[in-house]
Image (spheres, rainbow, N blue to C red):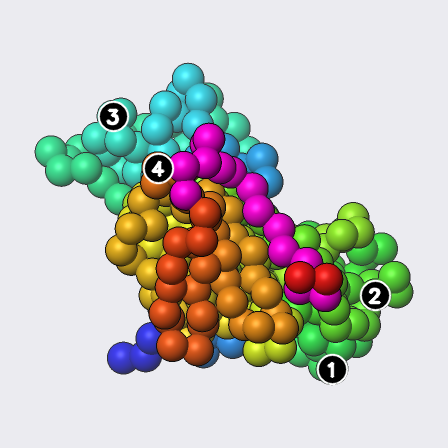
Amino acid sequence: MQVVLNVSVDYPENLAVDWVNNKLYVVESSVNRIDMVDFDGSNRVTLITENLGNPRGLAVDPTVGKTVVHGGAVIPHPFGISLFEHSVYFTDWTKMAVMTANKFSDSSTQVVFNTSQTPHGVAVIHQLKQPYVSNPCSVDRGVCEQICVLSHRSDNGGLGYRCKCRMGYDIHADGKRCYAVRQFLLFSSQLAVRGIPFNLSSQEDIILPVTGSPSYFVGVDFSAEDDSIFFSDTAKDIIYKQKVDGTGREVLAANRVDGVEDLAYDWISKNLYWTDPRYRSISVMKIADKSRRTIIRNLNNPRAIVVHPLIG
């Protein structure tokens, strides 16, 4: 048994295998995201993070491209999904059943199996499910510098693939080469801490998104010297530090940090400042030994904070 993913993966509610290009697709429902990774866990990229609604099921057909199925009146609450020949098989929580329909039309759904337990994953096991087909990514990654992703056979001028870049890189204008991203936008939301490129790009994330449940991420800052980020989780009332690749997470503070809404890092003195509206205060921590003290009290609802170490 081999662990493929164990960082920034909280609710992987469905998987799909691209047996032609040896890729694994993962539906991360807690943050409405679809990731792609090699079978050994390397070359992880975020494929889709926007306008997914509430993703549950995913099926891929690398012989022609990818198919996404969503709910509706006929398919009220689908979860797992699997394709075989002209049919799509799926589990439905409203009808508590494994169901099937013609994949070209959802007007003739049929119940295959009823269950009293909530149905989740479903997969059709058949040798014909994974036929041999030519792989345009098999030779020199399809001239992609880093990652070659199969797409519809009519896509990209008929090439049937597109190039993607690893975390920390963005795609060049030629659509093939990758260049290291030295600056990007770090932001937090209730569900995740993400790093995204400034420019419009097909590269969804520059860093591996920080996730966790239950979590409510608010304050963020970074340390360029050791390639780390700081972030506060107001659901757990903890301030963290970790590497941008998702490794080395450590707790900086978990006491009297009940609602930290902003962080500011002094990269010269290696001190971290934060605001806490619940204690109406601003505090500072020396990162080296985690010693801390409150420097300003009795503030009226402090929110944001910035530091300018060059002028004090």
The amino acid beneath tag 2 is: His
Separation of disc 2 and disc 3 at Cα? Answer: 47 Å
Which disc, if any, is residue 278?
4
Helix, strand or loop at mark 1:
helix
The amino acid beneath tag 3 is: Lys
Q: Do the residues labelled 4 and 3 touch (CB within 8 Å)?
A: no
The amino acid beneath tag 1 is: Asp
Helix, strand or loop at mark 3:
loop
Mark 4 vs mark 3: give the one in front.
4
Q: State which tag comes first along the sequence, 2 or 4.
A: 2
Which disc, if any, is residue 162?
none
Left or right side of 277 for 150: right
Per the image, the residue denoted by label 1 is 140
What secondary structure is the stretch in magenta mostly built from?
A: loop
Looking at the image, can residue 87 be seen? Answer: no
Per the image, the residue denoted by label 3 is 95
Per the image, the residue denoted by label 2 is 172
Mark 2 vs mark 4: give the one in front.
4
**Numbered range of the magenta stretch:** 297-310
Q: Residues within 10 Å of mark 2 (few under 14, many from 20)?
A: some
Separation of disc 2 and disc 4 at Cα? Answer: 46 Å
Q: Tell me residue 164's x, y (percent).
A: 69, 65
Mark 2 vs mark 1: give the one in front.
2
Separation of disc 2 and disc 1 at Cα? Answer: 17 Å
- Please give the name of the residue rendered at 67% of the width and 61% of the height, measured from the top-left corner: 312
Separation of disc 1 and disc 4 at Cα? Answer: 56 Å
- Please give the name of the residue rendered at 19% of the width and 37% of the height, measured from the top-left corner: 118
Q: State which tag comes first along the sequence, 2 or 1.
A: 1
Q: Tell me residue 287's x, y (percent).
A: 45, 72
Q: State which tag comes first along the sequence, 3 or 1.
A: 3
Q: Tell me residue 79's x, y (percent).
A: 35, 39
